[in-house]
Image (spheres, rainbow, N blue to C red):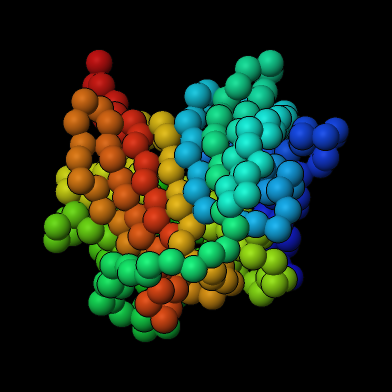
Amino acid sequence: MSAVVQELLDILDLERLEVNLFRGRSPQVGWQRVFGGQVIGQSLVAACRTVEDRMPHSLHAYFLLPGDPAVPIIYRVARIRDGKSFTTRQVNAIQHGQTIFATMVSFHADEEGFTHQMAMPVVPPPLDLPSEMDIKQRVLPMMPDPVRAYYERERPIELRPVEFGRYLGQRQAEGRFHIWLRITDTLPDDPVLHRCILAYASDLTLLDAALIPHGRTVFEKDILPASLDHALWFHRSFRIDDWLLYAHDSPNASGGRGLARGLVFSRDGQLVASVAQEGLVRQRRTD
């Protein structure tokens, strides 16, 4: 297993301090604040470690304060409800005596019911798109400096944008954007692990969708982005070590905030998850 994938697994493998109390760490990569997807994923891990025999189906969270990557994060789980069909957990992430992130996670026992879903968008398959190595060799020289720096790093989640011209400032029709993603190594057959890693990955590109109609990206130096809240629903089983299509759009931006949505499909067209997030998309003032 590659070092970057093992590091991600280690980051999600929280240390149990006491009943309902866990400790997580952040990678020491020089970031000024903790990546939001890390706190989402670690909070989901903490909640899942207090529940047996049922899977998480939804998560609703608020980012309250920037996380400090230099110190551990304490996750405190409150067992809100243990019902016959549903289980509810509240998780608070704490640093320096303050709650930096709060989330509610709901678990549901498997049962039969009505079934329908939105159709998967028609896009080129991942193997027909430039790989990250191709992008580094052919496209990176044309990209803005912040975007180039992002793609030059080795990362555990591989991204293959369908419309990678978006990172060159091109506006996308109807403000939609599609990315194929997967973790770069084969994982154990643990459905909880696959859901926690998708929770981590769901924050990688989502807020950027709010700038698509304007031909801008969160990588630009005069854009000040910050996630405010995050919602995630799991619909069907999936594997994060196989390609998933993450389809983004943004129905609104106003008042310095942008709303972004995402649908996640498996390669065979199954809708496996839905995501929504509102965040700050401020433009830096010239004064």
Side (left or right) of 182 relative to 19: left
What quarter of the picture does the C terminus occupy?
top left
Side (left or right) of 117 relative to 29: left
- Percent across and percent down for residue 39 are 59, 39
Vertical placement of residue 226 versus 155, above or below: above
- Percent across and percent down for residue 205 are 40, 52
Vertical placement of residue 239 versus 142, above or below: below
Q: Is residue 247 visible from the viewing direction of this image? A: yes
Residue at the left extreme of this rendering: 173
Side (left or right) of 243 relative to 119: right
Q: Quadrant of residue 89?
A: top right
Residue at the right extreme of this rendering: 18
- Viewer-closest of 4 and 231: 231
Q: Residue at x 19, y 54 (%)?
A: 175
- Percent across and percent down for residue 267 are 43, 78
- Viewer-closest of 98 and 155: 98
- Viewer-closest of 140 and 73: 73
- Percent across and percent down for residue 42 are 65, 44
Q: Residue at x 58, y 52 (%)?
A: 85
Residue at the bottom extreme of this rendering: 128
Q: Residue at x 63, y 33 (%)?
A: 80
